[in-house]
Image (cartoon, rainbow, N blue to C red):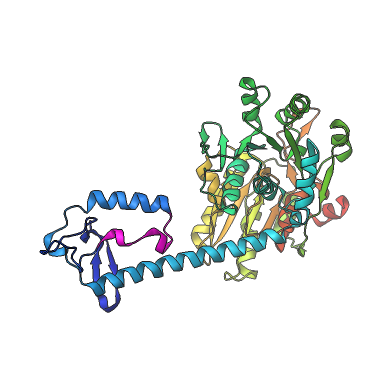
Amino acid sequence: MAAYIVFPKNTCLPLNCASTEPRRSTNGGESKDHFDLKRLKRDDYGIPQDISKRYFVFAQREFQDPPSHLQHVPPWLIRHFEYAVQLSLDFFNDLKFKKVKELRKSQKDLPIAERRQEIIELLKDNQVLIIAGDTGCGKSTQVPQYLLQSGYMGIACTQPRRIACTALARRVAYETLNAYGSEVAYQIRFETTKSKRTKMLFLTEGLLLRQMENDSLLQQYNVIILDEIHERHLSSDLLIGLLRDMIGKREDLKLILMSATINLELFKGYFEGAPVVQVPGRLFPIQLRYHPIKQFIAESEKKSHKIDPEPYVRILELIDKQVPSTERGDALIFLNGVAEITTVAEALKTYAELTKAWIILMLHSTLSVEEQDKVFDVAPSGVRKCILSTNIAETSVTIDGIRFVIDSGKILGRLAHIVVHDPFSINNNYSSKKWLAYWNICRSIVAYLWSFQKILASC
């Protein structure tokens, strides 16, 4: 099928009308009015070499024998075509430059940007570096970039969850202007974007442990970053112990430990006085409102393990009434497990279908990577996202655009190493960690689904 470009004066030129070989005139020379694809030099128009090469190979294959009535194109039409190509390239280059300019400004505004040089210098002089940065300071996305910019290669960055690997790889690749899956890649179970060009790899802790079965010294890596080490999984604790022994055998190996909340004295003692870089976060104003729903107060005091989705529907109704749809801002609801998420999602989807103002999304570890990635998409104008998530959105990933954080005040806990599947109440200090990430990046409104007396008692 022929593609067309619209020129001034409503004139159209079919793109498959041109031959890549110069047409000879009757006197043996080249016809001046013949349109030649090779005249579009990539050096003149800034066309990427790999894209340009693929395009011309395609052109040579497809445009060898154009119809006879399309082999002669007026010179003025050729000029219009070249002018249109130039305008198009200039337009997209301007867009790209604008995005890069805004991106670099946002990177400089991150709290960790002030410690960039200190981090690089300390890493040069020490094998182990501990970075304690508040949630939202930019450590997970910026520290890997600082290493790339300083010439480090063979960088492995571990994350406790798959979604963190994919999300961070995508973000770092975007900020470093790398094609997704080239110099910056991710590797999770049964899926990878790693290639021969890869210099930095985001992977799960369990996968790095499996790699050590075949390569006990991890010779393929020069720098290993352990992120979110405060979660203290079995795999992360095992990795820390193995890597401490490994740095004694490999003097060229660098190890970076990163966390938002960390026992500094414990890790400094374990790694024999490793230097620590502490990075404070940035705080935006936050509104905490107590809005009792009378008909639910009595019922809330009853002991019931089955979640009631009605309060969550009422919160969305309240947001629709008090916040204009023209103001951007999505909602994040913390729930306990897939069962609660599914129950609440069914009720919220019914409300969303009636109002056409919400997109209901779920986020938990059992979803596929494609389904998890949907939470990072930007909602259409006039529509908000409502994300129902486990604590995966607490520290592993930070979702842009969150303005409303809803917390039930209960978690599935662990008592004496036994998983407790009945949710129990948490104190305000723990609950504040859930919305702290979004307090650090935007102006937020927090809704606690527990009584005001409990909030005061836990402060």
Q: Is residue 398 left or right of residue 282?
A: left
Of all residues shown, which one is farthest toward the bottom?
9
Q: Is residue 51 left or right of residue 419?
A: left
Q: Is residue 450 magenta?
A: no
Identify the image quadrant of the N terminus: bottom left
Along the line of sight, which residue is nearer the eye, 348 or 155? 155
Q: Position of residue 130 (x, y in %)?
A: 80, 41
Q: Is residue 332 left or right of residue 454?
A: left
Along the line of sight, which residue is nearer the eye, 401 or 12? 12
Residue 193, placed above or below residue 62: above
Residue 303, placed above or below residue 347: above
Q: Is residue 281 left or right of residue 195?
A: right
Residue 202: image quadrant is top right
The residue lying at 80 percent from left, 40 percent from top is: 125
Q: Position of residue 25 (x, y in %)?
A: 13, 63
The residue lying at 80 percent from left, 44 percent from top is: 122
Residue 259: image quadrant is top right
Along the line of sight, which residue is nearer the eye, 364 or 408? 364
Q: Position of residue 300 (x, y in %)?
A: 74, 50
Residue 413: image quadrant is top right
- In the image, which residues are magenta? 36-48
Q: How many marks?
A: 0
Residue 386, placed above or below residue 10: above
